[in-house]
Image: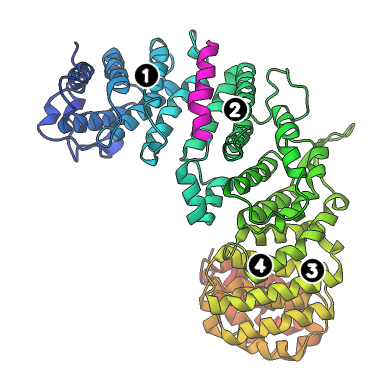
Amino acid sequence: MHRVPWSWPMQRCGSSGPKGGTWRCRVKRGASRRSWGQCTWSFGGSHATGRRSADRESIELLLAATQVLFDLSRLVMVDQVQENLQTYMQGILALLQRLAPNAASSELLQELCGLLAMWLSRYGEVLEAFVGRSVEAVWSLLIKLDESTEHDALVISAIAVLSSVSCQEWQASPFKDPTVLAAICERVVLPNLKLRASDLELFQDDLQEYIARDVEGNDIQTRRWAAIDLVRSLRRRHDKETCEFVVTCIQRVLRETVADPRSAAICKHACIHLVISMAGSTGGQSIQSPGGLATEFFKEQLGPELLAVQAPPQGTSVEAVLFKAACLKFLTVLRNILPAELMLGVLPVLPLLLQAEHPLLHSYAAICANVLTTVQERVHEPGALPLWRPRYRREQLGPMLLQMIPTMLQILVEGRSIPKNTHLIRALLAWLNFLGPTVPPELVVKILQSLTQLVRALPSSGSGHAEFVHLLFGSLALALKAHSTAGSTAVVFPMVEQLWVSQVEDLLPYCYQIMGLMLDLGHSPVPLYGELLPKILAPDLWQAPGKVPGLVRLLRAFFAKVDFFRSVLQPAMGEIFARFQQALGNRQSASAAVGLLCAAFRFLPFELYCNHFQVQLHHSFGADGVG
């Protein structure tokens, strides 16, 4: 057996890596004298014969050598590696096939799979001869692994190798064999899409984290994500064959589990994600329905289940809840692919699911109704450039959204969902933005009453959950804009006074923004605003950059109402421009300071600030400015 290059196995802790960095491996002093190729040969052979178990020193050396080899070939495969590629690959494949995955060897196997996936994706021209054996070695490893969580990282790395091979064109691709595709769908993809005991535990113990992984894209390092990525990689070169095996696999699984409702729900959940991974596939034009496989699957399997809901689900089993939530996720993820008629047919079910007792169902119903308001479609008109416009009009979604808003408010006020559920309040914000002035005035008052009640509860419960607070005040602002009347202002103003008196630091910037908005809406200003002007010009308030945009927004509203506030603005001009200079001196608030100056020039008559004009221009454009 040829020895590997003499230089790289001797890298030690602290030695310089590429471009002055340090190697991320740690090699023991005694073990570093042995070459990685020799260790792989001796260890793989002894393990195959079963004469002795793996010694810890060998595994540590192999792990360190694998990490060094990864670093050496990350950017380019150097000549020394190419010259000994046969030796390296023999060792890698022998380890993947013969080394039993356990606590001691799992990290080594994971690093080997990562190295192999990187090589296959970047240096395919020199690894053509090893493609088939690589797939066989990874396959032999995957079938040894169970569904326990300690093997998750290793399974993800092994599936990444298959993805690297499947998305490229090879002279003798192993995926051209129908039996290989069928085995991968049956033994690799589907098992890793199914709900496991750990998923059910997470669902029971931490629902918020479960939702984050399921719909917020936090599942990128999970088995499910790896399996979906593998299917998408297979489609790049073998779309028709993959689609056929997926359809066959789904049909078989659904037939086998029809007698057991619990197993059927779990298997349908896996099939939903399998079809999501095939989104838009037409199986080489063998499927003629708009939306391809996704549309056919929904019509046959999911549509009847959803349309059968005639009342808010109460007290359903865990499996039933997860299955209905997966159906809503299917609609949410594939909203741009599924036909509009199909989506509109499901709308009557969403208000019922929003009333569901379980937080997962009403959260997913809100998310689904939220994203429907954002779907765009491309419109081609003769002689004009293509345009994008909303697929669903207010007349189509409006009745459903107006029916869901009171339910949403009740859930939020009564606390019947996840604490500070950002999905619900984000959906309310999107609905108000979509409906605009079509929201009835009486509903606007009810919205404002509920939202102000939620705001009043924030200081007592802590103003954490910054995203929830931000969306809450955004919804409040949109409700005020929808129908700005004296009645709506009367609902909000006591809440603003309470925030001002309580001086909750995290909420004061929103308080300034809401006060400025109410001034801008054109109602007769109340005397309290005139009393507040000297207080908002206090230098201490302007020291925090986060408060400055809200203060500028409020001052801008004062300037726009100069006819009403002239008597209090004129003596305060010196303080106003002093606050401008203070904000301009801080880079974090400089842009807001410029906005304050522009608002003064736009709304105020020149005689109000003529004595300060030259000085402020000097600060804005001179050496004292931010520049």
- Give the residues drawn in magenta, as a range: 176-193
Give x and y (percent) for residue 62. 23, 28
User: Label 4 vs label 1: CA separation?
Assistant: 53 Å
Read off the residue under disc 1. 137
Q: Residue at 65% across / 74% down in the picture?
A: 454
Is 188 magenta? The answer is yes
Closer to the chain start, of discs 3 and 2, is 2
Q: Secondary structure at mark 2?
A: helix
Q: Residue at x 39, y 33 (%)?
A: 146
Q: Tag 2: residue type? A: Glu
- Label 4 belongs to which residue? 412
Question: Which callout, 4 or 1, points at the residue further toward the start of the chain?
Answer: 1
Q: Are marks 2 and 1 in contact (CB under 8 Å)?
A: no
How far apart are labels 3 and 4 at the CA level? Answer: 21 Å
The vertical placement of 623 against 163, above or below, is: below
Q: Residue furthest left?
A: 30
Can you tell which quarter of the image residue 128 is in? top left
Position of residue 348 measured from the top left corner of the image (x, y, whole percent): 81, 50
The answer for how far apart the CA atoms under marks 1 and 3 are is 63 Å
What's the magenta bit mostly, secondary-structure-wise?
helix
Q: Which residue is mark 3?
A: 481
Q: Residue 120 is drawn in which quadrant?
A: top left
Task: Tell me which numbered mark, 2 or 4, is placed earlier along the sequence.
Answer: 2
Q: Position of residue 111 (x, y in %)?
A: 32, 31
In the rendered image, the quadrant that contains the C terminus is: bottom right
